[in-house]
Image (tube, helix red, strand yellow):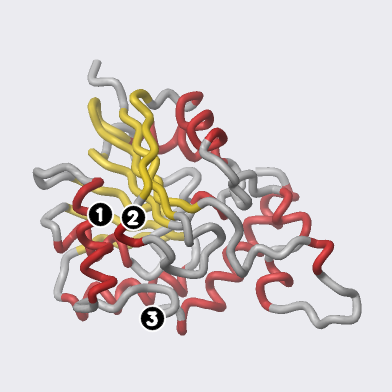
Amino acid sequence: MSDDADAVQARITAFWNVLASGYNTADNVAAPGSSEYTAWLETVRSLLPETPSDVLDVGTGTGFVAQMAAELGHRVTGVDLAEGMLESAQDRIERAGLDVSLLVGDAVRPPFPPASFDVVISRSVIWTLRELETAFRSWQTLLRPGGRVVAIYGLGTGPMDESPAQESAEKPMGLFQRHYTAETRNALSAMRLQDHSLPIRMAQRAGLVDVTVSSLELVRGWETSPGSDLPHALVGHRLIS
């Protein structure tokens, strides 16, 4: 990465490290045993293979999807650059009595050999990735033949998505604005998605085939990430041969 790209990523990672200790709340992740959690579990079940598979959760955060994939019987690895988030994820996984490998790693370039996984999944992550096409290329490379990428994301704008025009010089900058500066937001091509054309195009250019997008009606209106009120899942596959 260039110095500018390093600075952008440093601000993003610092933001999530600050949030980590208090992120496992009902406003951000559904509590196990709740009806909302059951809806997410069934949604993730519908997106993953029926047979136990090797699943990589990129940008795992506090391990929400990693926990559900493990509960469904998959062999799960989670990576995140925010070590604070990984500490929360480790606590979550241990309390659930599950076996998930959690590692510090970049969602854009996960540190694994090619063909290591059957599934690469992300949830509420692509909006904060600085190199979306590179990420899709990396994920495609990590798949075994016939494997799939699953990217859960939203359309529209969420409450954290504040434009520079809305920021006043007299108004103290909040945590989000201090880290997601104008420079940072301008580096994030999927932050303000109004349709699916960009992620579909990036996935196809990365070599994924049979790319589809479906609406996730069971979990509509959940969370506070940008666009999460209209959640969708992009699914693309690596060629079998």
Query: Left or right: 225 with respect to 101?
Result: right
From the image, which quarter does the N terminus lie in? top right
Residue nearest the viewer, comparing 47 with 107: 47
Tell me the SS state at disc 3. loop
Residue at left 47%, top 77%?
Answer: 20
Give amino acid for label 3: Ala
In percent of width and height, residue 229 lies at 48, 61
Q: Is residue 147 above or below residue 40?
A: above
Q: Quadrant of residue 62?
A: bottom left
Q: Nearer the viewer's eye, disc 3 or disc 2?
A: 2
On residue 44, which mark appears?
A: 1
Query: Left or right: 155 with respect to 176?
Result: left
Give amino acid for label 2: Glu
Tell me the SS state at disc 2. helix
Residue at left 75%, top 61%?
Answer: 163
Task: Give the total number of marks visible in the rendering.
Answer: 3
As measured in the structure, the alpha-carbon distance from the residue carrying label 3 to the one carrying label 2 is 19 Å
Q: Quadrant of residue 144?
A: top left
In percent of width and height, residue 90 lies at 30, 73
As measured in the structure, the alpha-carbon distance from the residue carrying label 1 to the one carrying label 3 is 18 Å
Residue at left 38%, top 75%?
Answer: 87
On residue 26, which mark appears?
A: 3
Residue nearest the viewer, comparing 117 with 166: 166
| Residue 37 visible somewhere in the drawing | yes
